[in-house]
Image (cartoon, helix red, strand yellow):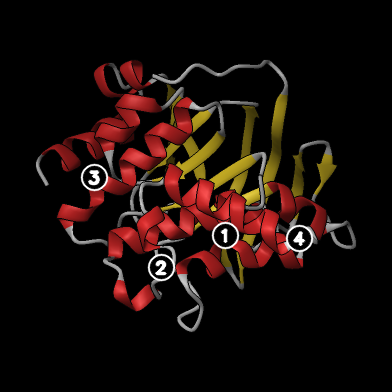
Amino acid sequence: MTQANSTDPIIIAQDVHKYFGQFHALRGVNMTVQKGEVLVIVGPSGSGKSTFIRTINRLEAHQKGTIIVDGIELKEGSNLDAIRREVGMVFQSFNLFPHLTVLQNVTLAPMQVRKMPKDKANALGMELLERVGISEQAQKFPAQLSGGQQQRVAIARALAMQPKVMLFDEPTSALDPEMVGEVLDVMKTLAKSGMTMLCVTHEMGFAKAVANRVVFFDQGNIVEENTPEGFFNNPQHERTKMFLNQIRHA
């Protein structure tokens, strides 16, 4: 299990509500995340877990409650660009630019958003591609890579903005089974480096290996949260027990 390296909260969510029309997707979520903490968020489909992490960089706007990221409250009219520079996100789909090389995909945002000189951005890009284990693919185009390699490029691209928080929204769910491990290995290394991470995933082995906390969502709220050992070995809530029983027999 990864050790959180600070007692300073970097994310504070208080009574967060989110509606999609009449559908009440988040029903008063409360969560505090410390710097360097790794949270794995699990739950059934439609439980609100992906919606919640998308509110943290305001890809989804919440209608009620408070979300504070690194001291900045997310609200209408606030400097969302400043928050998004500090929060990297990796999605199910890779969202790479097909007409750019791997290295160009990684260096685009630092050059455009952080105004980093091209030579410095290229050096950073190569360093990050080395870190995710695909530096030899730098001059290839996304279509020439496997799904696992493309997802590792997407992680490197998010890291290129040098964020303080990384969000992962089921990053292995679109991959062929044999490619899942290579992406999880990169995420494990990142977790051990001290990066603050919130990961929505179905990979329970990953949760057991690196999480400080496992958080279980159901019907738009947090039903249970605990250390991995406590969550998997001694769940307290009947809904959690049912969920764990279902995934063990899946």
Q: Position of residue 53 (x, y in %)?
A: 56, 50
SS assignment at label 1 = strand
Task: Select label 2 or label 1 by which is in front.
Answer: 2
Q: Which residue is mark 3?
A: 181
Q: Residues within 10 Å of mark 4 (few under 14, many from 20)?
A: few
Q: Residues within 10 Å of mark 2 (few under 14, many from 20)?
A: some
Q: Earlier in the sequence, mark 3 or mark 4?
A: 4
244 to the left or right of 135: left
Distance between the alpha carbons at the discs numbered 2 and 3: 17 Å
Q: Residue at the far right: name it.
A: 77
Q: Residue at (73%, 53%) from the top-left corner?
A: 85
Residue 24, numbered circle: 1
Badge 4 amino acid = Pro
Q: Earlier in the sequence, mark 4 or mark 2?
A: 2
Q: Is residue 247 visible?
A: yes
Task: Select label 3 or label 4 by which is in front.
Answer: 4
To which quarter of the image does residue 60 belong?
Answer: bottom right
Distance between the alpha carbons at the discs numbered 3 and 1: 35 Å
Q: Residue at the far bottom: name it.
A: 99
Residue 117, numbered circle: 4
Distance between the alpha carbons at the discs numbered 2 and 1: 26 Å
Residue 93, numbered circle: 2
SS assignment at label 3 = helix
Q: Along the line of sight, which residue is nearer the eye, 157 or 74?
A: 157
Q: Residues within 10 Å of mark 1 (few under 14, many from 20)?
A: some
Distance between the alpha carbons at the discs numbered 4 and 2: 29 Å
Is disc 3 in contact with disc 1, using a CB cutoff of under 8 Å? no
Distance between the alpha carbons at the discs numbered 3 and 4: 34 Å
Q: Residue at the far front: name it.
A: 119
Q: Residue at (65%, 29%) from the top-left corner?
A: 32
Q: Position of residue 140 (x, y in %)?
A: 39, 72
Badge 1 amino acid = His
